[in-house]
Image (cartoon, coloured by chain):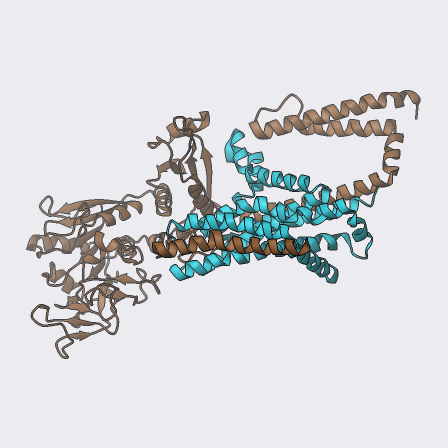
Chain colours: A brown, B cyan
Amino acid sequence: MNENLRRIAPGVLFAGVIVFVLGLVVLVSTMIWGTGRGPVPTEWMLLGGVVLMLVAAVLNPDPVRRLFGVRSVRAGSNALVVSLAFIGILGLVNYLGTQKQFNWRQDFTSNKQFTLSPQTLQVLESLKKPVKAYVFTGLDPTTGQEQPYNKKEILDRLNEYALRSPNFSYEQADPYGAQGAVLADQFEMRLPYSVIMTAGGKHQETSGTGESDFTGAILKVTTDVTRTVYFLAGHKERDPNDASVAGYSSLRAALERENYTVSNFSFLVTDTVPFSATVLVMAGPATALGDAEAAALDAYVRSGGRLMLLIDPQKPNPAPALLAAWGVELRNDEVLDQQFVQGANPLYPLVVRYPNHAITKKFTGLPSVIPMVRSLKRSETYTGTATIESVIQSSPQSWGETNLDFQASPPQFDNGKDTMGPLDLGLAIESSGADLAPGAKKSRIVVFGTSEFASNRMLQANQFVNGDLFLNAVSWLAEEEALISIRPSLSDTRQITINDQQWWLVLVSLVCLMPGLVALAGFSIWWRRR
Amino acid sequence: MKNIWAITKRELGAYFASPVAYAIIAAFLVFSNALFMLYLQQREASLRGWVGTTTFLAIFFGPAITMRLLSEEKQLGTIELLLTSPVRDWEVILGKFFAALGFWVALLLLTLVYVVILRIFGNPDMVLVAAYYLALVLFGAAALSIGVLTSTLSSNQNVAVFTAIAIMLVLWIASFLTQLIPGGSGNAIASIIAYLSIADHTNDMVKGVIDSKDLIYYLSVTIGCLFLSTRALEARKWG
């Protein structure tokens, strides 16, 4: 090689290294800060640097030859190449492991606390358009603390959603950053740190950070219809605004999480059921309906209306004509069951019998408590074409006690008077549709023999599926089959019972005795070896 | 396999013949038992809090367990004997790693006394307990493999142990470092750094959720460090 060319080789090498390093700096700054690309594309700078270094090697190949002639360098380069290849393979395996199609997750908690509920999975599977969640999180300028406090939990939960649907994604945004502030304004965010669900131009701020809140918000941004559940008032019914133990405020909150609008309705205000009613609920009326009211209700149901009746024992049948017309009879009894909830009495049957109906088909093995309930039956004289199906039944050890004065005589099964279990505690009725006008909706009715099972008192115990039973019945009436599944479960916190004496015994044994014994063993070994 | 087993047995024997090992066990038990009692105050029949903190203890105890494995051999010059004996380099590394892992598992076995205590005074979820111990074994294996690597690279035990702790701490705080990067989690570099965070990969396991990506991560760190340790051991022959 020409001596002159040899002389310029170090300069070319230097230029190559500078260009390559500059390329790397630009590449990293682009990736981190997203700064704009310079006049020369990064990849050209990197390539240019490598080419210049190669040119330098060609101009003066002797040093390269000498370097690779050294045994240690040769072996070292081989080892470097093999090591880089091995690390590359590990990197690839890890990359693939993060991809949805190769991911495997197993929740080992007893109540599948970190597994999305079947309802959420159903909603995610049926997502037709992309849904994106924005998690507003950042350092609070006043406290310097990262907010919200449960950020990790929120991200973990949303990650579960993203793993389950290719149409779901999420992103963090800092409400104090420039971009985050713009997004917060755009989404009309009310709270300082929130999760906003967006889809197709619609957005919804979640009411909380639980699974039901996220799923509810997804439903809200992906459905275009407003669904209203009306609760009939005027006959001493249960009130969805009543927060007492006998009230239905918990149920109202649960319905609103499912994106139903909940309203009261009275025949005193209007003599027909509102046109906007998706479902009408009559929860535990203490008096019967007047003739005009019964006629209005009958007309509503016949025109494809959706009605839920919850009729307590020892109360009059509020709409005898309507129930008879749809083939349902109320027995004048109260169900007692030997299989009752712990700490209660036989008037609190623990129910695990769910016939195969859409409302309860996923409840297999899950208990509900249906307290103070009367039994129902299909009318033997019914000649109509409606389908009447049992939703929930008491156990074979139960019976319908007809002697309702429990103070006067203790309840016991009287053959001939009482009815032996299993007894129907809830029935679902659907019109056949054979005589419907084109485009008309089928009528649906759900009747339960009690209104107590959905009260605030009963919904406090989250180990029972009482709330799900009511919500599923509403979903079935509203033909929202996607919602019919178990609602998100709560954490399973197991407590220990330990008194002070036991506590001190454990403390001394663990913190003093156990390490002390090990230290003594070590000391004896040291002594022997000494 | 015979060679690996022979080295593992020899190293395990050496561990339990040394008073230093008992000092490590005693120190671990003091910290671990105190942490367990701290979380027991919450009256929960769960090891969740303890597991989360014990992974942090592993950052310090892992390198302490591995520091002497190869550094001591180099310091005493016995490494030359080992390398000229009819065993392969990877057999040496694996044998020593399994011995350290055996020691770590022995430490964890001592903590099973917590499970007994929880069973006496409550009803812990045993499946969850098993998942917790799997997490601790995997985390421990990763920490020990980093310790084996630094022990291979240095003939000074102190340098080996502090380098391993430094690497573990950097990996531990990796996800916090991402906060320094504008753009947060949406940034590609931030995502890679966050993925490298060894602490983040314990989160699911501590909750009782086993995710394949966490298993892959821990196994990758372990296998990767053992592979590099083998390469580093081989490098002694070049010069």
Which image quadrant: the C terminus of chain B? top right
Observer-nearest of A414 and A240: A414
Q: Quadrant of the N terminus of chain B?
A: bottom right
- Tell me: A482 left or right of A442: right
Q: Quadrant of residue B106?
A: bottom right
- Does residue A305 show up? no
**A506 to B74, vertically: above or below:** below
Q: Is residue B10 left or right of residue B63?
A: right
Q: Is residue A240 left or right of residue B146?
A: left
Q: Is residue A39 above or below residue B104?
A: above
The picture places residue B80, in percent across and down from the top left corner, at 81, 49
Q: Position of residue B81 (x, y in %)?
A: 81, 52
User: Which residue is found at the position 93% from the left and 23% from the top?
Assistant: A2
- Between A411 and A324, the one nearer to me in the picture: A411
Number of residue marks: 0
Picture coordinates of residue B232, whole percent (x, y): 75, 44
Q: In the rendering, at what x and y percent does residue A71 appear?
A: 86, 41
As rendered, which of A176 and B153 lies closer to the eye? B153
**Residue nearest the viewer, comparing A142 with A266:** A142
